[in-house]
Image: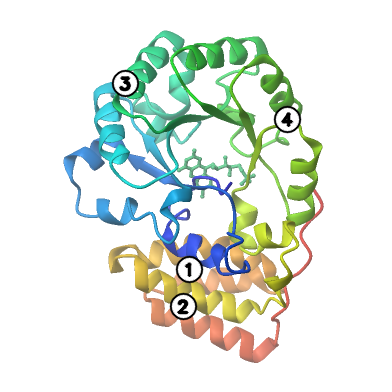
Amino acid sequence: MLAPMAELSHRPLRELIEGFDAPGCGGCDEYFTEMISAGALIGGGPFESFYTDGGPCPEKVVYQLVGADPGHLAAAAALLDRLDCKGIDINMGCSAPAIIRTGAGVRWMADPDRAAAMIARVRSATRRRLSVKLRIGTEDNFDYLVAFCRRLEAEGVDLITLHPRTGKEKFKRRARWEYVGALRSALRIPVAGNGDIAGPEDLARRVASGCCDAVMVGRAAVRTPWLFAAAKKTPDTGVIDLEEVALRFLYLLTKYQPSEFHISRARRFFNYFCDNLKWGTHVKNRLNREETLGGIERVLRGYFNETGDRKPKPPPLS
Ligand SMILES: Cc1cc2nc3c(=O)[nH]c(=O)nc-3n(C[C@H](O)[C@H](O)[C@H](O)COP(=O)(O)O)c2cc1C
């Protein structure tokens, strides 16, 4: 599954990922969207149609909602319920201070009663598969995590994705995958694991290990959007040309996103994608100074023309 990532898990990235696979194979099994503010969605913000664009494969899209108000979350879930999609996910893992301050993200995990009551309201608003993505919690306490997830399970959550770090850890320390298997043993509903998958071999190994019901990949799928196809050893993955991939992403961005989003989203994407390049840090710095997509395209074309650096580096070992 593709992880929900703000400014990254949108239609252009899904189109890019699907494009590496043989027709009919599907890039990955499920695409979580970036978190969508429940309040903004029901308020009808100007960009909501882009957040709810489930293309090119809406049946595989899981819309992720973020918010602190149970009424907003339930109303937003009811709205998304009417769209073609795989499911609806509630963000209980985001540890960004601006989100926690509002009572959303991982803050839900500090108050099991409040979280259970919110889930009960959302559950009654949608027939879709309802999932929750969370972290270990605000502290490293496995028993607390199990008790918390059992409350969610009792309220009708169908799937839990665990990113096994605490809220405070952000991306520090390694993801504690042993918690994923242990949580799965403690619950009746399926559990997905997420964190630090570095490349296709790593993904295939985690899937084969059977430690969880699904594996979710975030940053590595931006760095190497061919990762899912490569993990399945799709014959058509073919030879990757980094310039082609970079320019295709820019094309998809202009085709499917509003111009107000272009620069921020291009910078986010290339912040990871440039890790494939020999002089990636230098290119990232140059891209961050560009104010237009045309400028970004010129920097990229110039780099590939000068260096011929078109083949991806092997993924780092995890
Ligand atoms: C730029 C960025 C944005 C993210 N935005 C979200 C988000 O909107 N919702 C969410 O639940 N997690 C979000 N995450 C966390 C990822 O979904 C995932 O849990 C995390 O990156 C660990 O997986 P990885 O090691 O495969 O990247 C974000 C992560 C990154 C790097």
Say which residue label 2 marks: 296
List x then y, in percent, for residue 308.
70, 87
Check disc 2: other Cα within 10 Å, few if <14, some if 14-19, many if 20+.
many
Could you tell me how far apart the alpha carbons at marks 3 and 2 are, in whole angstroms? Answer: 46 Å
Q: Is mark 2 in CB contact (under 8 Å) with mark 4? A: no
Q: Is residue 16 visible?
A: yes
Residue 124 percent across, percent down from the top left: 31, 21
Place residue 50 in its image quadrant.
Answer: bottom left
- Mark 3 or mark 2: which is in front? 3
Tag 3 or tag 4, which sits nearer the N-term? 3
Give the labeled residue for mark 3: 124
Categorize mark 4 by other alpha carbons within 10 Å: few (<14), some (14-19), many (20+): some
Name the amino acid type tagged 4: Arg
Q: Quadrant of residue 42?
A: top left
Ligand 1 image-quadrant field: top right
Circle 1 residue: 288
Q: CA distance from mark 2 to mark 4?
A: 37 Å
Q: Is residue 92 visible?
A: no
The disc label shown at residue 176, or none: 4
**Rendered residue at 34%/62% (across/down):** 261
Q: Is residue 203 above or below residue 91?
A: below
User: Are the residues at dot 4 and dot 3 in contact (C-beta closer than 8 Å)?
Assistant: no
**Disc with the residue nearer the chain's start (2 vs 4):** 4
At numbered mark 1, what does the secondary structure look like: helix, strand or loop?
helix
- In this picture the colour scheme is rainbow
- Amino acid type, callout 3: Ser
**Residue in view at x 40 percent, y 82 percent:** 294
Crowding at label 1, few (<14), some or many (≥20) Cα neighbours within 10 Å? some
Residue 214 vs residue 207: left or right? Answer: left
* Label 3 vs 2, first from the N-terminus: 3
Question: Is the residue at mark 1 in contact range of ligand 1, meaning its CB lies under 8 Å from it?
Answer: no
What residue is at 37 percent from the left and 36 percent from the top? 65
